Image (cartoon, grey):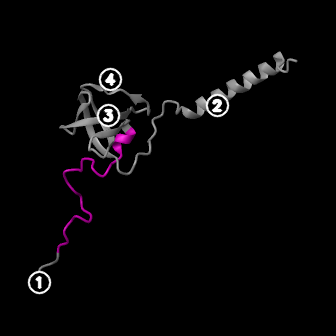
Amino acid sequence: MNRCTPHTLAISAVVAASALLASCASDSTGGASTVRQFPAAALRGDMVVTAPPAITLDGKADRLSPGARIRDANNLLVLSGALVNQKVVVNYLRENAGNVHEVWILNPEEARLKRPNSKAPWFSLGGAATPATTPAP
């Protein structure tokens, strides 16, 4: 006894295809860059992969951990060998041993946002850091 007729197979194929297209459409951003949410402990730096797993962060020698994950601006995984001698702005996390374990290559919107260790401006235009002046008697 055959329970699947050609008509029901065609309907199920159309439903499956429409569900697949809907999920793909909801995942894409249409080329617009978005700002990802990073862990609060993530640090900012300029990374150059010299000879994997050796890297430099802000000009200082460092190392990627075994199993380090590098994500590009589209949040896709990238192998460290594909980034050799390219300077990229990243947010990163370290593992317990001190090696860099999680890396996110930033898109221009994310790079504009400040992190606690981002480079501070060389000057201040006032605020809490400005000393109070008292008039002389």
Residue lying at 70% horizontally and 26% vertically, measured from the top left: 16
Task: Please tell me how crowded label 1 is: few (under 14), some (14-19), or many (20+) other residues with Cα within 10 Å.
Answer: few
Residue lying at 35% horizontally and 33% vertically, measured from the top left: 67
Q: Nearer the viewer, residue 96 or 19?
A: 96
| Magenta stretch: includes residue 122 | yes
Q: Judge from the rendering whether residue 2 lies leftward or rightward of residue 135; answer left or right.
A: right
User: SS of the residue at dot 4?
Assistant: helix
Q: Residue furthest top?
A: 6
**Nearer-N-terminus badge (3/1):** 3
Height in image: 137 above or below 9? below
Q: Amino acid at mark 3?
A: Pro
Residue 66 marker: 3
Residue range (magenta): 109-133
Query: How far separated are the C-alphas under marks 3 and 2?
Result: 37 Å
Q: Judge from the rendering whether residue 72 lies leftward or rightward of residue 58; answer left or right.
A: right
Q: Amino acid at mark 2?
A: Ala
* Residue under label 2: 22
* Residue under label 4: 82
Query: How far separated are the C-alphas under marks 3 and 1?
Result: 66 Å
Image location of residue 2, percent across then percent down? 85, 17
Task: Please tell me how crowded label 4 is: few (under 14), some (14-19), or many (20+) other residues with Cα within 10 Å.
Answer: few
| In this view, the mark in front (3 or 2) | 3
Query: How far separated are the C-alphas under marks 4 and 2?
Result: 32 Å
Q: Judge from the rendering whether residue 74 lies leftward or rightward of residue 26; answer left or right.
A: left
User: SS of the residue at dot 1?
Assistant: loop
Q: Nearer the viewer, residue 113 or 48?
A: 48
Q: Amino acid at mark 4?
A: Ala
* Residue under label 1: 137
Query: How far separated are the C-alphas under marks 4 and 1?
Result: 67 Å
